[in-house]
Amino acid sequence: MKKYLYLLFFPLISGCYDDHGPGGDIVFDGTGYRPIYVSEEKSKEVLTKPAEPLADPGKIYLLEPYIFVNEKGRGIHIIDNTDPKSPKNISFISIPGNYDMAAKGTWLYADNYKDLLTFDISDPTQVQLVKRTPNIIPSVGDYPPHVNVYFECADPAKGVVVGWEKVSMPDKPKCRR
């Protein structure tokens, strides 16, 4: 039995050492990804704004008669659904780097890059940020959302990485994924 388990897992173990395909390296084609930064202060700026149209909606939470709809990467829409035939988009909570939310009762939880935000939504027309728990969410922004690519290594001294752009690069960057 032990011999069969070894034969089953050997290909998995031996394949872990070379995750870049034949030759063990990614071909550098003169392009790579460069991080886009914003200041630490700007990345934590949470504002309630007038309603905005939904563009890339995500999760939904219902606290009758209100609906909270995540706008991927940007924040949360608040919709008054008192009349389901004619819902009214009443406001938008701008939360940079917000991709997820959850709620329980009158508490709304949302990510803001690495931070977890807690909002009191007992009065959805007057949403209040009551707590910020810093650095609780693992960062995925330090790497481009692509694999088998070269990229400039993220530098925390330059700010928070909020995106990536593909650019021409004269030299092969040190970082790869």
Image: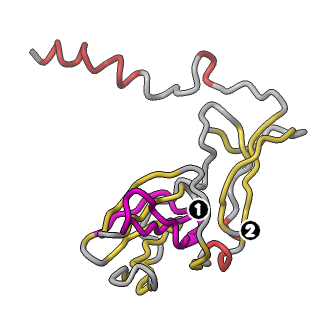
Quarter of the N terminus within the rendering: top left
* Quarter occupied by residue 13: top left
Q: Amino acid at mark 2?
A: Lys
Residue at horizontal 56%, vertical 49%? 56
Residue under label 1: 74
Task: Estimate the x, y position of residue 75 in percent, counting from the top left.
Answer: 54, 65
Residue under pointer 2: 158
Callout 1 secondary element: loop
Tell which tag, 2 or 1, sits nearer the viewer: 1
Residue 93 colored in magenta in the image: yes
In this rendered view, identify the residue nearer to me: 120 or 140: 120
What residue is at 43 percent from the left and 68 percent from the top?
Answer: 110
Q: Which stretch did the figure color magenta?
A: 74-103
Q: Quadrant of residue 82?
A: bottom left
Tell me which residue sits at (72%, 68%) in the image: 38
Packing grade of label 1 (10 A; few <14, some 14-19, many >=20) is some
Q: Is residue 19 magenta?
A: no
Q: Which mark is residue 3?
A: none
